[in-house]
Every structure is written in C-alpha cells, then in structure tokens.
Amino acid sequence: MKSIFKKRIRATAVVGACAGLLTLGLAGSASASSVPPWRFEVCSWGNYQTNVYWGNGGFMGVPPGQCLSQWFQPMTTDTSYEYVTAYVNGGGYITGANLNVAAGAGLATGGTSSAPYGWTY
C-alpha cells in the first residue's frame, strides 16, 4: 500500500515539474520581443498595403506579405515611446499603439482590407 502511494506522489511531482517548466518556457518566449532595441518593425500580412504613421511625420508603407523596419536614434533615457497608427492604404483605420522602440517593437496587420486587424509584438 505504501509503494502505490509513493509512486503517485512521484508521478504528481514529475507532472507538476514538467508543467512548470513548460509554462516558464512559453512565458519567456511570448514576452520577449524578437525586434532589436531601437528598431520598429511593421509586417503587413493582410491583402492590403499597411500605412503606418508616427511622431513628427514618420511614415512607412508596407506592401502586402512584407515586413519593413525603421531604426530610431538611441536616446539617453532607457525608454522611448512612439505612438503609431496603422491604416489600410486608401482605406480605414486599423489600430494605434504606444510602443517602446528602445526595447524593440513590432506591429503586424492581417485580415482583409474590409476587415483588417492588428497586433503588437
């Protein structure tokens, strides 16, 4: 009777440890940006060109199925937030976001020109 109880405790501990490692692994990869510091990347995965605007006249027109990048000048502070807005080329608003380009930031769009959506990474 005692050996069955010990086996169940060991199995529970192994399953719990594996679940903890899997959770930590997924959390680490999901929270870290793949974009280098002081770089802003835009990917247009929809069937339309994505036009992105920021700051004092910044603009990037990203053709469908492509990604483009913009480098920012490093500043003395450790954060540099830029508010960016994305639009369908010749169409409507997709999204807006306040992104920390000092840490590296990305914006992607998808869907169709009549039903666009966006997300940050």
Image (cartoon, grey):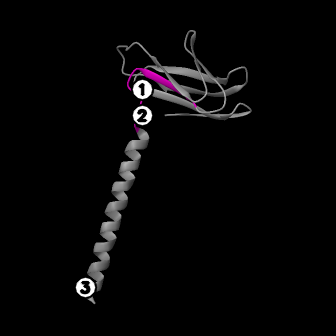
> Marks 3 and 2: in contact by CB < 8 Å?
no
Whether the magenta-drawn stretch holds residue 39 is answered as yes
Eye-nearest disc, 2 or 3: 2
How far is the residue under mark 1 from the one under mark 3? 53 Å
Q: Which mark is residue 33?
A: 2
Residue 4 position, x and y percent, is 29, 85
* Residue 36 occupies quadrant: top left
| Marks 2 and 1, the one that precedes in the sequence | 2
| Marks 2 and 3, the one that precedes in the sequence | 3
Residue 60 position, x and y percent, is 57, 17
**Few, some or many C-alpha atoms within 10 Å of disc 3 (few <14, some 14-19, many ≥20)?**
few
- As rendered, which of 55 and 64 lies closer to the eye? 64
What amino acid type is highlighted by mark number 3?
Ser
Residue at x 28% of width, y 79% of height: 7
| Marks 1 and 3, the one that precedes in the sequence | 3
Residue 65 position, x and y percent, is 58, 30
Residue at x 43% of width, y 15% of height: 72
> Marks 1 and 2: in contact by CB < 8 Å?
yes
Residue 25 position, x and y percent, is 36, 49
Question: Which quarter of the image is occupied by the N terminus?
Answer: bottom left
**Position of 17 compared to 54: left or right?**
left
Query: Which residue carries the number 1 mark?
Result: 104
Q: Helix, strand, or loop for circle 3? A: helix
Q: Helix, strand, or loop for circle 1? A: loop
Query: Which residue carries the number 3 mark?
Result: 3
- As rendered, which of 16 and 88 lies closer to the eye? 88
